[in-house]
Image (tube, helix red, strand yellow):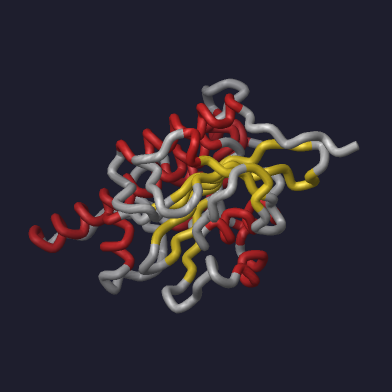
């Protein structure tokens, strides 16, 4: 006999908590932008996706605006309001990445400014923490590719990244839980703001920003798990290099 689908109040509380945090950071300007959280269910191999329906913002919503959907399809299994087209991308990410249980999608001003300015589509790193927090390289989807309307290309890149930039549109961060997705979102956007400030200052002073070398960044990705979630915090990279 099928297990009834019921709204999990604990998931709902977490959803509203992070909706408020994301809005409080200034990421939300209108009804666009969303969070998706996966919850296990015995009758759904990919679990179920909690998200907000269309036509209301994360800033305005409360628990009554949450709907629950299937993951491989857009079928709404709890609630009645439609989701936005952006939910297609998040569902496909959850379908392809069983290790990921939450996504956050926003339209960040600094990110849109940097990557619409003609700057190379690459994630330059000034500070120490972004590769450790992100865990994998940032993936850029060109502006002419709409991966929300057509998710067919997502499988070609999603295993190798934890943050997707939709150039000229927005970004989607991935996490094993909503907290991790939130940390990755904030880490990426903070570094984008640092890059913008460093480039502006360098242009005025005639200097060059001190970006970290690619081999340093790759080394940081390699140690991300042990730095962010350490068994113990001391000498992690040093001991590995000595082996």
| Above/below status of 90 relative to 49 | below
Residue situated in front as seen by the camera: 25 or 31: 31
Q: Quadrant of residue 7?
A: top right
Left or right? Give the position of 126 relative to 150.
left
Left or right? Give the position of 38 relative to 2.
left
Q: Quadrant of residue 38?
A: top right
Q: Quadrant of the C terminus?
A: top right
Across and down, in percent, residue 68 comes to: 62, 44
| Above/below status of 99 relative to 115 | above
Residue situated in front as seen by the camera: 112 or 74: 74
Across and down, in percent, residue 67 comes to: 57, 44
Looking at the image, how many numbered discs can be counted on the residues? 0
Q: Quadrant of the N terminus?
A: top right
Residue situated in front as seen by the camera: 123 or 177: 177
Residue at 69% over, 32% down: 6
Q: Residue furthest front?
A: 80
Residue at 76% over, 37% down: 41
Across and down, in percent, residue 127 comes to: 34, 44
Across and down, in percent, residue 64 comes to: 49, 36
| Above/below status of 91 relative to 149 | above
Q: Residue furthest bottom?
A: 144
Residue at 20% over, 52% down: 197
Residue at 67% over, 65% down: 155
Q: Does the rendering let one see residue 23? A: yes
Q: Residue furthest left?
A: 204
Q: Does the rendering let one see residue 102? A: no
């Amino acid at each position: 006999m099928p297990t009834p689908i019921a709204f999990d109040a604990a998931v709902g509380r977490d959803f509203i908590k992070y909706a408020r945090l994301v809005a409080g950071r200034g990421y939300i300007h209108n009804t666009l932008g969303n969070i998706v959280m996966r919850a296990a269910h015995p009758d759904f191999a990919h679990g179920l996706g909690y998200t907000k329906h269309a036509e209301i913002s994360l800033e305005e919503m409360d628990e009554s605006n949450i709907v629950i959907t299937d993951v491989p399809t857009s079928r709404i299994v709890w609630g009645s309001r439609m989701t936005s087209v952006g939910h297609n991308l998040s569902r496909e990410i959850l379908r392809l990445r069983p290790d990921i249980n939450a996504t956050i999608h926003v339209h960040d001003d600094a990110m849109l400014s940097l990557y619409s300015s003609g700057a190379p589509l690459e994630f330059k790193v000034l500070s120490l923490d972004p590769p450790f927090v992100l865990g994998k390289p940032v993936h850029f989807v060109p502006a002419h590719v709409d991966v929300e309307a057509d998710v067919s290309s997502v499988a070609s890149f999603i295993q190798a990244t934890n943050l997707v930039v939709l150039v000229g549109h927005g970004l989607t961060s991935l996490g094993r839980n909503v907290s991790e997705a939130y940390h990755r979102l904030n880490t990426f956007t903070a570094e984008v703001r640092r890059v913008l400030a460093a480039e502006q200052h360098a242009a005025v002073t005639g200097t060059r920003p001190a970006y970290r070398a690619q081999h340093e960044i790759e080394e940081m990705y390699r140690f991300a798990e042990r730095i962010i979630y350490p068994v113990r915090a001391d000498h992690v990279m040093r001991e590995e290099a000595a082996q």
